[in-house]
Protein backbone atom coordinates (compact mmCIF):
# COMPACT_ATOMS: atom_id res chain seq x y z
CA UNK A 1 0.00 0.00 0.00
CA UNK A 2 1.04 3.59 -0.61
CA UNK A 3 0.52 5.67 2.51
CA UNK A 4 -2.27 3.28 3.43
CA UNK A 5 -4.41 4.51 0.51
CA UNK A 6 -3.84 2.06 -2.32
CA UNK A 7 -4.55 -1.64 -2.34
CA UNK A 8 -3.16 -3.67 -5.18
CA UNK A 9 -6.56 -4.88 -6.27
CA UNK A 10 -8.78 -4.10 -9.20
CA UNK A 11 -12.32 -2.92 -9.63
CA UNK A 12 -14.78 -2.42 -12.50
CA UNK A 13 -16.10 1.13 -12.88
CA UNK A 14 -18.00 3.41 -15.22
CA UNK A 15 -16.24 6.50 -13.80
CA UNK A 16 -12.98 7.06 -11.96
CA UNK A 17 -12.74 8.14 -8.30
CA UNK A 18 -12.77 11.73 -7.06
CA UNK A 19 -9.46 13.53 -6.50
CA UNK A 20 -7.15 11.77 -4.04
CA UNK A 21 -9.63 8.89 -3.62
CA UNK A 22 -8.03 6.12 -5.69
CA UNK A 23 -8.09 2.98 -3.52
CA UNK A 24 -7.18 0.38 -6.15
CA UNK A 25 -4.20 0.11 -8.45
CA UNK A 26 -6.20 -1.18 -11.44
CA UNK A 27 -9.46 0.18 -12.85
CA UNK A 28 -11.40 -1.72 -15.53
CA UNK A 29 -13.50 0.95 -17.22
CA UNK A 30 -16.76 -0.45 -18.61
CA UNK A 31 -17.01 0.94 -22.15
CA UNK A 32 -20.77 0.28 -22.26
CA UNK A 33 -21.55 2.56 -19.29
CA UNK A 34 -18.65 5.04 -19.13
CA UNK A 35 -19.22 8.66 -20.06
CA UNK A 36 -16.66 9.53 -22.72
CA UNK A 37 -14.29 11.09 -22.04
CA UNK A 38 -13.74 9.64 -18.56
CA UNK A 39 -12.53 12.28 -16.11
CA UNK A 40 -9.15 11.50 -14.55
CA UNK A 41 -8.88 13.34 -11.24
CA UNK A 42 -5.76 14.08 -9.18
CA UNK A 43 -4.00 11.29 -7.32
CA UNK A 44 -1.57 11.20 -4.42
CA UNK A 45 2.09 11.96 -5.03
CA UNK A 46 3.91 8.86 -6.30
CA UNK A 47 0.68 6.91 -6.84
CA UNK A 48 0.55 4.55 -9.82
CA UNK A 49 -2.62 3.24 -11.45
CA UNK A 50 -3.49 1.16 -14.49
CA UNK A 51 -6.60 1.87 -16.55
CA UNK A 52 -8.06 -0.87 -18.75
CA UNK A 53 -10.73 -0.40 -21.43
CA UNK A 54 -13.20 -3.19 -20.69
CA UNK A 55 -15.31 -4.15 -23.69
CA UNK A 56 -14.70 -1.46 -26.26
CA UNK A 57 -13.09 1.91 -26.76
CA UNK A 58 -12.83 4.33 -23.84
CA UNK A 59 -11.56 7.91 -23.97
CA UNK A 60 -9.64 9.39 -21.02
CA UNK A 61 -9.73 13.17 -20.52
CA UNK A 62 -6.19 14.41 -21.05
CA UNK A 63 -6.48 17.55 -18.86
CA UNK A 64 -4.56 16.09 -15.88
CA UNK A 65 -2.07 14.06 -17.94
CA UNK A 66 1.31 15.61 -18.77
CA UNK A 67 2.01 15.51 -22.51
CA UNK A 68 -1.14 14.66 -24.49
CA UNK A 69 -2.96 17.40 -26.37
CA UNK A 70 -6.18 15.40 -26.91
CA UNK A 71 -8.16 12.76 -25.04
CA UNK A 72 -6.34 9.42 -24.83
CA UNK A 73 -8.11 6.66 -26.76
CA UNK A 74 -7.96 3.18 -25.22
CA UNK A 75 -9.24 0.52 -27.58
CA UNK A 76 -10.87 -2.64 -26.18
CA UNK A 77 -8.50 -4.28 -23.67
CA UNK A 78 -6.12 -1.34 -24.07
CA UNK A 79 -4.18 -0.19 -21.03
CA UNK A 80 -2.73 3.04 -19.70
CA UNK A 81 -0.40 3.02 -16.70
CA UNK A 82 0.12 6.37 -15.00
CA UNK A 83 2.11 7.80 -12.06
CA UNK A 84 1.07 10.98 -10.24
CA UNK A 85 3.87 13.50 -9.65
CA UNK A 86 3.37 17.10 -8.52
CA UNK A 87 0.09 18.14 -10.12
CA UNK A 88 -0.08 15.75 -13.09
CA UNK A 89 -0.34 12.13 -14.11
CA UNK A 90 2.63 10.96 -16.21
CA UNK A 91 2.35 8.09 -18.68
CA UNK A 92 4.47 5.09 -17.68
CA UNK A 93 3.24 2.72 -20.39
CA UNK A 94 0.38 2.04 -22.77
CA UNK A 95 -1.00 -0.75 -24.97
CA UNK A 96 -3.65 -0.40 -27.69
CA UNK A 97 -3.80 3.33 -26.99
CA UNK A 98 -3.69 6.45 -29.14
CA UNK A 99 -1.88 9.31 -27.42
CA UNK A 100 -1.73 12.59 -29.33
CA UNK A 101 1.12 14.94 -28.41
Image: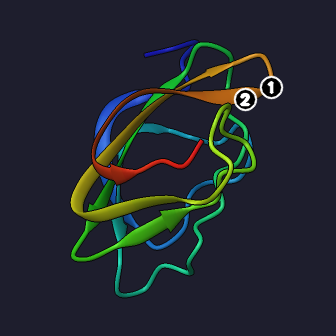
Q: In this figure, what is the number of numbered marks?
A: 2
Real-space Cα separation, disc 1 to disc 2, in angstroms: 4 Å
Left or right, 14 with reference to 45 = left
Left or right, 13 with reference to 38 = left
Residue that mark 1 sits on: 87
Q: Are marks 1 and 2 in contact (CB under 8 Å)?
A: yes
Residue closest to the eye, 24 or 56: 56
Q: Residue at x 66, y 51 (%)?
A: 62
Left or right, 57 with reference to 73 = left
Q: Residue at x 75, y 50 (%)?
A: 63
Residue 56 placement (x, y as % from top left): 26, 77
Crowd class of label 1 (few under 14; some 14 to 19; many from 20; radius 10 Å): few
Residue 78 placement (x, y as % from top left): 25, 54
Picture disc at residue 45: none
* Vertical placement of residue 6 versus 9, above or below: above
Residue that mark 2 sits on: 88
Determine whether the residue tagged by mark 2 lies in a helix, strand or loop: strand
Q: Residue at x 54, y 68 (%)?
A: 15
The image's colour scheme reads rainbow
Residue closest to the eye, 100 or 58: 100
Q: Residue at x 50, y 38 (%)?
A: 23
Q: Quadrant of residue 57?
A: bottom left
Picture quarter with the N terminus: top left
Picture quarter with the C terminus: top right
Q: Residue furthest front?
A: 101
Q: Residue furthest right?
A: 87
* Vertical placement of residue 94 versus 100, above or below: above
Crowd class of label 2 (few under 14; some 14 to 19; many from 20; radius 10 Å): some
Residue 5 placement (x, y as % from top left): 55, 26
Left or right, 53 with reference to 98 = left
* Vertical placement of residue 50 versus 3, above or below: below
Amino acid sequence: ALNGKVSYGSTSVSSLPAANSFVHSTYLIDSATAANPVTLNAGDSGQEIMLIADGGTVYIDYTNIAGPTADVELRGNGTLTLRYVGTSWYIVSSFEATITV
